[in-house]
Amino acid sequence: MHFIRGWRRSAAVITAIRSLSVKRLLCSIGSEDDTIFAVSSGQGRCGVAVVRVSGPASAHAVRSLTRGFPAARVASLRSITHPQTRELLDRGLVLWFPGPGSFTGEDSAEFHIHGGPAVISGVLQALGSLPGLRPAEAGEFTRRAFGAGKLDLTEVEGLGDLIHAETEAQRRQALRQMAGDLGRIYQDWRFRLKRCLAHVEAFIDFSEDELIEDGILNDVDTAVRQLMTDMENHLSDQRRGERLRSGVQVVIAGSTNAGKSSLLNMLTQRPAAIVSATAGTTRDVVEVPLDMGGYPVLLSDTAGLRDTTDSVEQEGVRRARQRVEQADLSLVVVDLTQVPSEPQLVPVFLSEHLKNILEHSSHRQQCILILNKSDLSSAEHNRSIQASLERSDDVPAACFLSCHTRDGLEDLLTLLQNRLKTLCGDPLIGSPSLTQTRHRTLLQKSVEALHQYHQYRDVDLVLAAEGLRLGLSSLGRITGRAGVFWQVGSSRSRIDHPSEWVGAK
């Protein structure tokens, strides 16, 4: 996944940080008892910049820079001065969030200042001059929120996805995950599996004393089977959530001079690829990210597929076929002037043509056939071809298009958006989808462990219980409840295995 970035430094901010005492930074980095600070409002000049401070010395930082103390969760306009020189740095809003009622669970403060580089640099230098304060590491505010139990790992990942969301559908999916919808599913499964494990272990320990109810293992068998069914249904989502998170791979493929580059330029509304009457102009993959109806798309134009003796073009053809193999959706462009003149022969021609472009039948099911240069054929002839295609079961959905006149573009966009919705699903409908490869891997391990339970159920109950325990561990690692020691009554937790933390692959 994308690791959550704490804050991005402009040149002025870097200068401010370098001016801090290197010795103090080296001594303090990595301690959870430190008070950390960072710009949390992004990079570049802006009207307002937010500097966040979190840790036990946050109150001291507020008093030192403002010569006062605001009420909790009330924005107060204050003069912000350097604690040593008493030079006025800026006038801005100061907010105080006492722990544990803050994002990190610690005492926190925010300075809302003007967003010029000099102002930001001055405030960061002032905070860095205070004892016990240091710049935050990347993702450290979120890491502390996780440690305080404010977020589980799925919510942390949802926050990261929300920060990087570029389309409406990505934003909706990330918001659901950040709100805990996905984490609650895994926590419910974990609770059910923990209950099954407790019953099996109790049967192992106390069955000879006749303190266990009859049929308890049968109930466990039923519960484990239902859990396996729920997990397998969750896994069989055709990677909708992962596609939505990372973008749908859409590839434009076809023979030379069919109009592939023209189609790319028309969809991107800019000259992204060179268009020429010379066959074989495109020899490499041209990629353009797009937002199509709220769905993220990585659109790729590829070299024309044909036999050639040119070594450079051969490499382009190889890359084109490789990209087609990896595509979620293929747009196969066909020159309409090259199809048979008799409409009844067109379906057979196109079926054979698709077999040459898309070698695997599964790829032919995930493609849209685009009959380009429709302006060079009569409308009556096009209607006859369309009627012939509708009677055929061997050819996928097709649309007529003219990249020259743009006729048929609306029909193509509608068909494309419907396919994208099918591939990604609606993030607001139904249960949330898997969004991370990490989730999928751990869920598959959990299902395998539950299979182990059934395998050893009548052979060795101890080994069967170990299968439940392994499944429980895999589920816990998805949300961060495994490999983590949660202290009862404490707002902190200790991560035993940092490599398991968010962002680790």
Image (tube, helix red, strand yellow):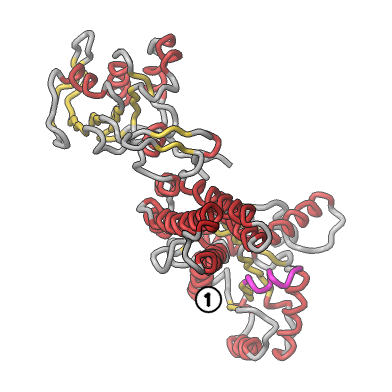
- Three-letter amino acid code at the position of disc 1: Gly
In terms of depth relative to the viewer, which is nearer, 176 or 361?
Answer: 176
Image location of residue 195, percent across then percent down: 46, 57
Span of residues in magenta? 359-367
Q: How many marks?
A: 1
Residue shown at the point (17%, 37%) measured from the top left: 73
Residue extending farthest to the right is: 309
- On whether residue 250 falls in the magenta region, the answer is no
Is residue 12 visible to us here? yes
Q: Residues within 10 Å of mark 1 (few under 14, many from 20)?
A: some
Task: Give the side of residue 330 with respect to residue 229, left or right.
Answer: right
**Residue holding disc 1:** 408
Image location of residue 33, percent across then percent down: 36, 22
Is residue 420 visible to us here? no
In terms of depth relative to the viewer, which is nearer, 459 or 119?
Answer: 459
Residue shown at the point (53%, 52%) measured from the top left: 205
